[in-house]
Every structure is written in structure tokens, then in C-alpha cells.
Image (tube, helix red, strand yellow):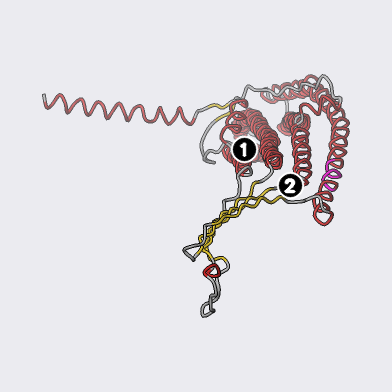
Amino acid sequence: MENWRYMMRIIKKIWILFLFPLQISAQENEVLSLDTILQRINNNNLLLQTYNLQAESFKYKAEAGTAWMAPMVGAGTYMTPYPGKKVMDERDKGSLMFQLEQDIPNSAKLRTQRKYMESQADVARAMRDVTLNDLKAQAKSLYFTWLVSLQRVKVLEKNDRIMQTMKKIEQLRYPYNQSQLGGVYRTAAKIEENKNMIRMQEGDIARARAWLNSIMNRKGNQPFEIDSTYRPRFSAALTLDTAALADQRKDIAKMNQEIRSMQLNVASMKSQSKPDFRIRFDHMSPLAGMMPKAYSVMGMISIPIVPWSSKMYKSGVKGMQYDIQAMEKERAAMLQESQGMLYGMQFEIQSMQKRIEAMEEKVIPSLRKTMDSYFLNYQENKMELPPVIDSWEALTMMEITVLDEKLKLYQMIVDYEKELYR
């Protein structure tokens, strides 16, 4: 029985050791789509969380703004003579006095102030949307850089296999004086140059991975892969009139919230013309036994409409109204500028798409056919190495150029979408 338990423990340990590498491999091979990354940024990014906290802060500040001042309580003497003074009558001994005083703010003032503070929370949420749009654009740019780097690596790995084949052919022919020693060295140099280019792309991928991890609020060295089959698609907006842009742009929504908040602040300033109230209750207990207890109740009201007081809030209202007009003009200018910019970006993207399509469908196939024919003649010992390398370099350069142009196109799409929903 004891031996059986011992064997079961050993089997369990072996099973754990067998599964542990599989778990690590599964974690390392995690593939994140672009939509998944964008969703994680929305949920986990620390900077975005600060705007939620600010909105909650304004919510409680709005509640705090409706509170009354604490009542004031006092105690002391009332009309008591100084020590050593002769008292002619019992009534002259004075009284002990207890006082209660309470400020009563105007409820209309409190309501306008609360609405203004609550509007600040809406501004914070709108600012979160603007920041989220910027982070999404940054994530897309990194994702597409990674995607193009993977495509470059595939091209370079294919080139490496071709150059390895050339090197072997040169090494086999050299002993029979069918090739030059320089050809062997040249192919070896091209192979190393190609490897360095692969290392550079791997560095770009590592940088993109670390940066994406950071904006997803993960460890910078946490491994994951992207969907290498993903291809960005450009969809032009159906309409670019200023009304449509005003509805979908996040910065315009933020400005709308700021204008609304300023308007509520104006209403709060105007409410300063309303009076505040105060009530005071005094209770006197005479020091003379024969005197009756007495009290005093007093109600007070402020008069904020007097000229030396009213100019404070009246001037503030005028200044804020000019600020609102300036922001409305700025909003209109931004919409007009964005409309022209987006039209220009559409034409530029469409032009870039046509250029890439021409290079992929016409230029690269011609260069590949040239390379294939030269390489076939080279294998049959009908051609020297230099023309083959020249045709290979021309094809490689064009393939890399197309990928560079694609990266530019993808970045233009990112910029277009960022501007469209900024």
C-alpha cells in the first residue's frame, strides 16, 4: 500500500512536469487580435482610469456643494460690570448669555452650483473619450508596424534560402574553376546582411510588443503574438459635412461639454444676485435672582444687488459669456478645418492604394520572372553570379519598398480614423 502511494506521487510529479512546459508554451503563444487589444486598453489603461476617478470626484464635490455651514454656538456674559465696580441695583449685575447662529444659504444658489459641479464630471468623461481615441490610434500604429515587420521577415527569410543556395552552388563550382572565390565571399556577405535586416525587424517587433503591453497595463516583457493574417481596410466616410463630424468627433463632444459647463457656471454666477439668510437666537440668564430670563431672535438677509457688491458677479458673467462665444467660434473653425483635411486624406489614401496595386500586380511579377529566369540559367551554369545577385537585389528592394509603402498606407488610415473620431 505504501509503495503504491509512493508511485502515485511520482506519477503526479511527472505529470505536473509534463504539463508545466505546455502551459508556458500556451501562454507564450497567446494571439491577440486588434479588437482584443483595443478592448483591453479601454478596460485596463491607467490613464483612462484617472478620468473615471476625476468624474467620481466631481460627483461628490457636487454633493458637498449643497451642504450648509455648521451652526455657531457661543456662551459668555452680557452687560456685566467690570470687577470692583459698585452695583447700584440688582438689574445691573448683567446676564449669562448663550447664542446660536445659523447661516441659511439660498436654495437656488445651491442648485446652480451643484449643476455646474456635476457638469465638470461630464467634461472629465468626454476627455477620457478623447484620450481613448489617441491611445487606439497609437495601438493601431504599433499593431500595423508589427504586422509589416512580420511580412518583411518572411521576404528576408525567403531571400536567405535563395542566397544559401547560391553560396552552396558557388562552393561546389569553385574547386572545378567554374566560379570565382569572390562569389563565395559575396554570397556570404549578402547572407549576413540579410540576417542583420531580420534582426532589425525583430527589434521593431519587440518594441511594438513592449509598447502595446504598457498601454494595456501589462508587464512590458509579457509575450504574445498578433494575428498575422489581419489586413487593414480603408472605409471612406459616407458624409463629411460639419454636422456629421460634430456628432462623431470626441474633441467636439468635449468642447460641447465644456461650453455647457461654462453656461452652467454663468447661471451660478447670476444666482449670486439672490440673497442669503442668517438667523440668530440669544438667551440671557440674569445673574440677579429676581430678574426674568430673556431671549432675542434675529433674522438677517444679505443685499447682493448693491453696486459695490453686484459688479463682482456681473463682470464675471460678461467675461464668461465672451469665453463661450470664443469657444463656439473655435469649434466651428475646427470642424471646417477637419472637413478639408479629411477630404485631402481620402484622396491621398486612394492614390497610395493605386500605387501599391500597380507595384504588386505589374512591377514585382516582372522582376520575379527576371529573377527566376536568371537563377535558372545560373543553375544550369549558363550565367555568372553578379547578374543574378543584381536581379535578386532589385526584386528584394521592390518587395521591401512595397511593404514600406503599405506601412505608410496603414499609418495614413490610422491618421484618417483618428481625425475622423478625434
Which residue is painted at 52% across and 40% down in the image? 219
Q: Amino acid at mark 2?
A: Pro
Image spot of residue 34 (x, y percent):
62, 27
Find the magenta span and give its range: 319-324
- Cα distance in 3D space between marks 2 and 1: 61 Å
**Looking at this view, is 210 or 313 the one in front?**
313
Whether label 2 touches label 1, CB < 8 Å: no
Residue tagged 2: 275
Front position in the image: 172 or 106: 106
Give the camera-side residue of 164 and 227.
227
Can residue 59 be seen? yes
Residue 228 point in image, percent of width and height: 61, 25
Image label count:
2
Q: Which mark is residue 66?
A: none
Please give the residue where the numbered disc 1 appears in the rendered image: 208
**Label 2: which secondary element:** loop
Query: Dominant secondary structure of the magenta stretch?
Result: helix
Percent position (x, y) of residue 164? 60, 31
> Which of the image's four quarters has the C terminus?
top right
Residue type, label 1 = Ala
Quadrant in which residue 167 is drawn: top right
Identify the residue at the far bottom of this view: 84
Return the residue found at the far left: 1
Find out whether residue 160 is within the magenta segment.
no
**Which of marks 1 and 2 precedes in the sequence?**
1
Q: Secondary structure at mark 1?
A: helix
Q: Is residue 191 visible?
A: no
Quarter holding residue 357? top right
- Image quarter of the N terminus: top left
